[in-house]
Amino acid sequence: MTGSDFTVLPRHVAVIMDGNGRWAKRRGLSRSEGHIEGAKTFRRIGEYAGDLGIKHITFYAFSTENWARPQPEVEAIMHLFGDYLNEAYDRLEENRAKGIRLRFIGDRNGISGELCALMDTLEGLTADMDKVNLNIAINYGAQQEITRAAQSIAADVKAGLLSPEEITKDTITARLYTGEQPPVDLMIRPSGEQRISNFLLWQSAYAEFWYSDVLWPDFTERDFDEALKAYEKRNRRFGGI
Ligand code: IPE
Ligand code: IPE
Ligand code: MG
């Protein structure tokens, strides 16, 4: 498919990359091997979304709750994330030619200094790009994100920079990691689970949800097309008629 095969494209797509562990288990592989395959799917679908002309896409790579997993699995995921960062750095010119702006959303505390430095570098070196906004959520939790915004607003009120009456929806939106990016139009969750797992709660206030039983490592461009086709048919009313 190409972007013109769709009558309407979501401005912002969010993807919960779920099912790596079950994919591996079914094959008698370790969970980490599932994450290796999942990382490949992430590269493929990220690329495809950009080719279709999706302007904003956010992938959920690691949640604030995922620290509860066994240490070797957490390390394997962080290692894969590091591989991706290094590859993105090596392919910087290619990504810039495609107009890809990379952003990492989530709490940097808890992420190694080495990875944080690479994340900062990649964000800086792609900050002038605006064709595709590729956000990766790492150590991300929406409740923590909203709490952080509330703290920053409270600090400004205390300092006399803002009065309580001046706080609007936009004040909060602007202080989230996604800042000025548009709200989520389409939320995709594979693997059969139908929950949001602390992902983009504020930004998804009016998102359309699309679920699939496919496990993330098996997720293809055709599945992505299917989600977009379903989105095309949704009647978004935003509370109107
Ligand atoms: C998603 O796959 C990847 C991360 C949460 C990092 P899972 O690892 O959650 O896979 P399942 O849900 O156990 O199958
Ligand atoms: C959500 O998946 C987090 C990511 C995909 C990074 P989980 O597998 O952690 O979510 P739950 O535990 O099923 O809600
Ligand atoms: Mg899971």
Image (cartoon, rainbow, N blue to C red):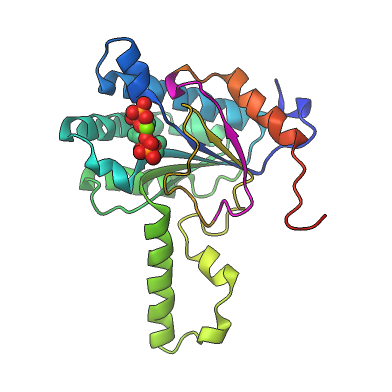
34 and 236: which is toward the camera: 236
Question: Which residue is most to the top?
Answer: 27
The reply to whether residue 61 is in sight is: no
Q: Quarter of the picture for ligand 3?
A: top left
Magenta residues, start to end? 203-217
Q: Quadrant of the N terminus?
A: top right
x then y, percent, for residue 143: 40, 58
* 128 shown above or below 51: below
177 and 237: which is toward the camera: 237
x then y, percent, for residue 183: 60, 52
Question: Which residue is most to the left?
Answer: 71
Q: Quadrant of the C terminus?
A: bottom right
Judge left or right: residue 158 versus residue 212: left
User: Would you say residue 216 sits in the magenta stretch?
Assistant: yes
x then y, percent, for residue 28: 27, 10
x then y, percent, for residue 209: 60, 39
Q: Main secondary structure of the magenta part?
A: loop
Judge left or right: residue 71 versus residue 81: left
